[in-house]
Amino acid sequence: MTYSRILGTGSYLPETVLTNAMLAERVETSDEWIVTRTGIRERRIAADDQKTSDLAYQASLQALQSAGLTAADIDLIIVATTTPDMVFPSTASILQEKLGIPGVPAFDVQAVCAGFVYALATANGYIKSGMAKNVLVVGAEVMSRLLDWEDRRTCVLFGDGAGAVVVGPSDEPGILHAKLAADGRYRDILKTEAQIASGGVDGTPFLYMDGPAVFKFAVKALSDIAEKTLAEAGVTQADVDWLVPHQANLRIIESTAKHLGLSMDKVIVTLPEQGNTSAASIPLAFDHAVKSGQIQRGQTVMLEGIGGGFAWGALLLRF
Ligand code: ACO
């Protein structure tokens, strides 16, 4: 039987740092409020001429190098993003052109902050079924472009960045189990409703969020799906070496870890320096933990993410 496993990881963060103190000069907020409620201290903001595919490209180059492969070895590209370069073509197609691998299938996955887990689960299916060999899976976002910089309830939460992994076939189990879920009845608590229509934009182009409702939903949904994923994989909490959660809010991360019985020193946290980078947050955190030597080969890692839709998922892997 063929399994799929992560062969290499990479990431990219734009250079510009936006601190809480800088935000406090724009809107009525404070470093203390933001840190206490969210855990975020600063975030990166893409340059005006940087698009999602540019961030994705940099992260992809690193992931390929870390996998010991070149772009020519890739036979499928999946990009998870909520902030595509344009309505169409897909950001994955644009990335494919940048990587110089015409002909390779490429598509985007839109599951907002759960996008990377959805994309990695999809790559796993392609590899196990023999439909693809080496898959480039990217989470990339310029969330700063969806923000109303006068709305303190949302503009303090998000950041830009990209993370990537190369997944390939293996005789040994790598991705052990993935579980995805969605519930469209909750679509209105987190959304950017704008759509291009008849030459204009219909609806507000800014991100809207009912923070308390999202918080409540996220904690329960993540805890439930993480528990089910472990049970279905036949793995106990004690076997999990690392939890790499979507980096939305430290309180959500702490609550989920507690529910799973994991101490915080087993949880990868990059939120203070990066904010919520939506689909990019999990691969950014994963790559950070690999580079820092925290996550090591052979260890068992749980990824989990949740976002607008609502869409959520968890994925258990042996690195
Ligand atoms: N600075 C200062 N005050 C603020 C700020 C801010 N940046 N933002 C909101 N406030 C004020 C509000 O205006 C409100 O004031 P009021 O009572 O005078 O009206 C007060 O703080 C409380 O507002 P709440 O929204 O109830 O604040 P809450 O304690 O719920 O914290 C937060 C807000 C941090 C957004 C919280 O609801 C949360 O963490 N929700 C989860 C949402 C999340 O993580 N979203 C990420 C995207 S979704 C995802 O990735 C899953």
Image (tube, rainbow, N blue to C red):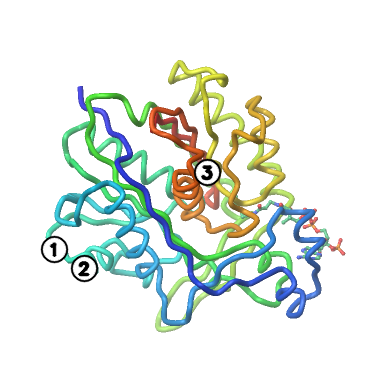
Q: Is mark 3 within 8 Å of ligand 1?
A: yes
Q: Earlier in the sequence, mark 3 or mark 1?
A: 1
Tag 3's secondary structure? strand
Q: Is mark 1 within 8 Å of ligand 1?
A: no
Q: Tell me which amino acid carries mark 2.
A: Glu
Q: Residues within 10 Å of mark 3 (few under 14, many from 20)?
A: many
Residue 8 x %, y %: 32, 45
- Residue position marked by numbered label 3 in the rendering: 305
Q: Is residue 139 visible?
A: no
Tag 2's secondary structure? helix
Q: Quadrant location of the C terminus?
A: top left
Real-space CA distance between mark 3 and mark 1, rounded to the nearest whole angstrom? 31 Å
Q: Is residue 190 visible?
A: yes
Real-space CA distance between mark 2 and mark 1, rounded to the nearest whole angstrom? 6 Å
Residue 88 x %, y %: 31, 69
- Residue position marked by numbered label 1 in the rendering: 102
**Looking at the image, which residue sits at the far front?**
293
Q: Earlier in the sequence, mark 2 or mark 1?
A: 2
Q: Tell me which amino acid carries mark 1.
A: Pro
